[in-house]
């Protein structure tokens, strides 16, 4: 019993001692003193568009916001005051930080502030990544100088900073551009300092506009945005795919518009071979060569690069000459809803991208209207620059959803002219007369206006097509065209262009080269590419064999989506009449030995 009483006495004694001790701590809490705190962040998930550097930046940014609001410089810090005062100061500062931290919206983490003196948590907040509101559009710009376009394209890129201030709330811009070699920049501009600074270098950037001085902001951005290795091959499909993936993650949007800016050369089968390339395709890297030709995108490599990207492009805009050919249309039809292309020439000025930004922003849910208005504005701008002088520029907006239906009609058209050509000599002669004077776009590309061709076929041999089918064919073509604008000069001279298609004879095609002044040209030579892969040049009234061009009609043209849909190569192999050798711009020129279409009848 005594032992029990002693145990109870000891228990009460300890209890009283503890009570006294706690009461003593409460008294201390009301007295000012130094308290030690520790700020920490436990990351439970992270989403970032870049690499580990991006994660570290986010972590530092979050911690930095909290430390700034608390007014300290390190994660472990001290405050002086009563316990209630110090804890309240921490709590209020951390609550102010929450809104700023949420705006970063990059990951999932718990931020904790612990009072190490009292061993109690003062503050805890769970950061949850919130869906980032997407812009309506992101413009993706991918280009290169092609040897002599750098200063024009720089002005195009400056235009990305010159849209209306409110437009950037709806439109993002991400860009990658490779400069020409120093040698070519100097030859084009004589600016040696500029050439040495940007020699074959690539820049990659997101546009952050500055309405106070957009041009200066653009130049500062270019100077500070070098990316990757010097003289990287920008025509490598992986390079374009990588850019698209980066841009769509850095600037997510509801719809994407991809611009490719450089020289364009339309379609030729020899240009479809990147390793034995001719001179016709799109986007020419003047710093990388294969068999003495600039490397470039082909119709197929361009389509495959875009298809391999994580996001689908709503619109593809080739800001380059000669790219509105059915061969490219069909190759790109499955990777975009709209194509913006030029059948003939694009002036060195290129597009006018501040117009594009503002039109997209003004039509956030109506891309068709935005592109139509942009088309009208740009061609009007080109007309103003050239002031009515002879100029052959145009632009079209193509709706890819209707290309398959047109392809079906064109296969029937091909079937009909082949059947007539093989069955009736009189019909063959009439069809030959159309081919002989077909509407050539430029001299060194075997591309001809497709509408002009089928209309003249119908005019010469209406019984072959029949009125009903001709109307169906014509309607199916125009159903693919959202908008078409041609220069004032082309309209006034009755030489509007619509879209181009390749023509040849017995499987071969020719590229013509002339010398002299526009008022009197002479044929210097032409190159003839045979279906079997052989090649020759014609000058001094005779053929001169040359090295094979590296492919065959079967391995190039016959593999195109357009030919698989229409079988057009059957006509290229059967047709026995050379199409007209002189381009639209030279129709009125007196060339010895050539009778122009104006003298046709």
Image (spheres, rainbow, N blue to C red):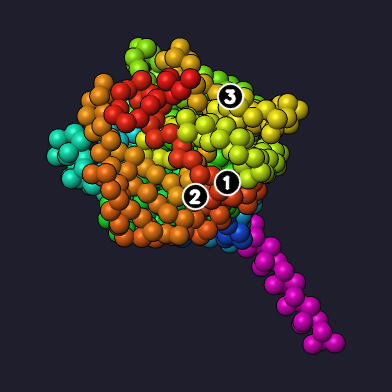
Neighbour tally class for label 1: few under 14, some 14-19, many 20 plus, Cα within 10 Å: some
Image-based side of 366 in relation to 269, left or right: right
Tell me the quarter of the picture where residue 458 sits: top right
Q: Earlier in the sequence, mark 2 or mark 3?
A: 3
The residue where tag 2 is placed is 506
Image-based side of 313 in relation to 52, left or right: right
Measuring from the top left, give residue 290's x and y in whole percent: 32, 58
Q: CA distance from mark 2 to mark 3?
A: 35 Å
Q: Residue shown at 37%/12% (left/top)?
A: 388
Query: Disc 2 on helix, strand or loop?
Result: loop
Q: Report if the CB atoms under discs 1 and 3 are less than 8 Å apart.
A: no
The mark found on residue 558 in the picture is none
In this rendering, the label closer to the viewer, 1 or 3: 1
Q: CA distance from mark 1 to mark 3?
A: 29 Å
**Which one is nearer the viewer's eye here, 97 or 432?**
432
The mark found on residue 571 in the picture is 1
Give the extent of the magenta segment.
1-26
Query: Disc 3 on helix, strand or loop?
Result: strand
Image-based side of 95 in relation to 468, left or right: left
Specify the quadrant that holds the N terminus. bottom right
In this rendering, the label closer to the viewer, 2 or 3: 2
Q: Earlier in the sequence, mark 2 or mark 1?
A: 2
**Which one is nearer the viewer's eye here, 545 or 297?**
545
The residue where tag 3 is placed is 483
Measuring from the top left, give residue 412's x and y in whole percent: 70, 41
Q: CA distance from mark 2 to mark 1?
A: 8 Å
Magenta highlight: main SS? helix
Q: Residue shown at 30%/57% (left/top)?
A: 546
State whether residue 14 appears in this view: yes
Q: Please check the rendered image and state whether residue 9 is part of the magenta-colored stretch, yes or no.
A: yes
């Amino acid at each position: 019993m005594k032992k029990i009483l002693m145990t109870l006495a000891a228990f009460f004694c300890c209890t009283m001692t503890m009570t006294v001790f706690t009461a003593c701590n409460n008294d201390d809490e009301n007295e000012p003193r130094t308290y030690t705190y520790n700020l920490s962040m436990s990351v439970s998930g992270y989403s970032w568009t870049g690499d580990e550097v991006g994660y570290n930046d986010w972590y530092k940014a979050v911690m930095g916001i909290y430390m700034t609001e608390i007014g300290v410089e390190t994660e472990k810090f001290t405050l002086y005051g009563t316990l209630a005062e110090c804890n309240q100061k921490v709590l209020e500062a951390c609550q102010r930080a929450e809104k700023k931290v949420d705006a970063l919206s990059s990951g999932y983490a718990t931020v904790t502030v612990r009072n190490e003196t009292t061993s109690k948590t003062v503050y805890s907040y769970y950061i949850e990544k919130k869906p980032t509101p997407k812009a309506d559009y992101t413009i993706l710009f991918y280009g290169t100088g092609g040897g002599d376009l750098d200063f024009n394209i720089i002005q195009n890129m400056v235009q990305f900073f010159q849209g209306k201030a409110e437009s950037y709330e709806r439109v993002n811009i991400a860009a990658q551009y490779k400069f020409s070699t120093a040698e070519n920049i100097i030859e084009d501009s004589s600016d040696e300092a500029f050439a040495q600074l940007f020699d074959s270098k690539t820049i990659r950037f997101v546009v952050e506009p500055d309405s106070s001085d957009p041009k200066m902001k653009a130049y500062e951005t270019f100077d500070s945005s070098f990316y990757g290795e010097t003289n990287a091959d920008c025509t490598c499909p992986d390079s374009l795919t990588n850019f698209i993936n980066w841009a769509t993650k850095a600037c997510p949007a509801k719809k994407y518009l991809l611009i490719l800016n450089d020289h364009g050369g339309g379609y030729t089968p020899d240009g479809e071979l990147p390793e034995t390339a001719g001179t016709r395709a799109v986007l020419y890297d003047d710093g990388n060569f294969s068999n003495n030709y600039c490397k470039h995108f082909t119709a197929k490599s361009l389509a495959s690069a875009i298809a391999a990207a994580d996001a689908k492009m709503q619109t593809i805009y080739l800001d380059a000459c000669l790219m509105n050919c059915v061969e490219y249309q069909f190759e790109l039809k499955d990777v975009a809803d709209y194509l913006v292309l030029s059948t003939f020439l694009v002036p060195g000025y290129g597009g006018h991208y501040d117009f594009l930004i503002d039109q997209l922003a003004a039509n956030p849910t109506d891309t068709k209207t935005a592109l139509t208005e942009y088309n009208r504005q740009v061609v009007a701008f080109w007309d103003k620059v050239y002031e009515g002088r002879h100029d052959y520029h145009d632009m079209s907006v193509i709706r890819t959803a209707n290309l398959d239906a047109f392809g079906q009609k064109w296969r029937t058209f091909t079937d009909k002219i082949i059947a007539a050509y093989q069955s009736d000599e009189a019909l063959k002669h009439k069809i030959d007369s159309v081919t002989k004077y077909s509407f050539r776009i430029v001299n060194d590309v075997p591309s001809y206006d497709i509408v002009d061709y089928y209309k003249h076929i119908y005019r010469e041999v209406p019984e072959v097509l029949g009125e009903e089918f001709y109307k169906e064919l014509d309607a199916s073509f125009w159903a693919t065209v959202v908008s078409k604008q041609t220069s004032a000069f082309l309209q006034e001279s009755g030489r509007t262009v619509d879209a181009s298609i390749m023509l040849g004879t017995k499987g071969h095609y020719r590229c013509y080269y002339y010398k002299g002044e526009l008022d009197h040209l002479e044929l210097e030579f032409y190159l003839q590419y045979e279906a079997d892969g052989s090649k020759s040049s014609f000058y001094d009234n005779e053929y001169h064999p040359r090295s094979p061009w590296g492919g065959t009609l079967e391995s190039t043209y016959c593999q195109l989506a357009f030919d698989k849909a229409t079988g057009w190569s059957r006509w290229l192999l059967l047709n026995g009449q050379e199409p007209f050798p002189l381009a639209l711009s030279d129709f009125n020129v007196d060339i010895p030995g050539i009778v122009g279409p104006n003298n046709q009848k």
